[in-house]
Amino acid sequence: MNHKEIEQTILNDPEQNLGLTITHQQFVDGIKANKLFYTFVGEPYQILTGGKKLAFNFLVIMYTAGPLVLVTFFAFHFSNWWLLFGILFSYLGSVSGAWKYHIPVYLMLYFIGEAIWGHWHFKDYDDFFFICMFWGYFWFRYADEHQNIFAKHDLLDNAEIYDRAIRNKKLIVLKVKSDDDYLEELKGLQKNI
């Protein structure tokens, strides 16, 4: 069974996907008591509304359109059109924000050392490109983290959003196993050995 098939099984099975059988208030109480776990099908920004959606869109603009404006400004200001490659570095930083290994964080160690020894200058290509890469990385990670925070707040605060997410199969709600449940499973496994 692949990931998509498992996801569909859970979405359509009321015994596994508690979201199909519980009310919004039961969901809120379960999340606050750490008795329920939820995950999104697709991206959490799809359920955002109002000010949270506006704030998330602003964060996305910071890593998508921000480099186009700011890097172009600095290239013009310093009369150095080679700095326009900073746009590519910024987008590389945004892409690396989704990777397991976060390149800009590792590069930061090098540039901290460079700053300590007094070799850091904003006009140097490597320093400028690092700042561009870190810009893209930072804003991507910030937006990614906040889409989850905003979606959680919308789900907990608004029953209509919760109902719509369940109805459109954008949310899976599962029961968190207690320590007793794990002990019972272990006893069952020991009997089978």
Image (cartoon, rainbow, N blue to C red):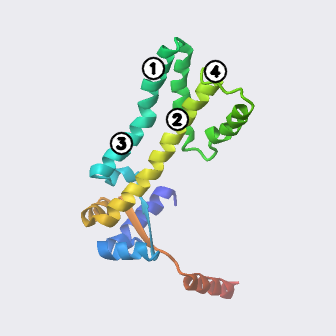
Front disc: 2 or 4: 4
Q: Distance between the Cα atoms at labels 3 and 2?
A: 16 Å
Q: Distance between the Cα atoms at labels 1 and 3?
A: 23 Å
Few, some or many C-alpha atoms within 10 Å of disc 4 (few <14, some 14-19, many ≥20)?
few
Closer-to-camera residue (141/131): 131
| Mark sitting earlier along the chain (3/2) | 3
Location of residue 14 by image quarter: bottom left
| Amino acid at circle 3 | Asn
| Mark sitting earlier along the chain (1/3) | 3
Mark 3 lies on a secondary structure that is helix
Q: How many numbered marks are there?
A: 4
Few, some or many C-alpha atoms within 10 Å of disc 3 (few <14, some 14-19, many ≥20)?
some
The answer to whether residue 22 is seen in the rendering is: no
Residue at numbered disc 4 = 124
Mark 4 lies on a secondary structure that is loop
| Amino acid at circle 2 | Trp
| Mark sitting earlier along the chain (2/4) | 4
Q: Distance between the Cα atoms at labels 3 and 4?
A: 32 Å
Instruction: Give coordinates of residue 19: x percent, y percent.
Output: 35, 70
Residue at numbered disc 1 = 73
Residue at numbered disc 2 = 135
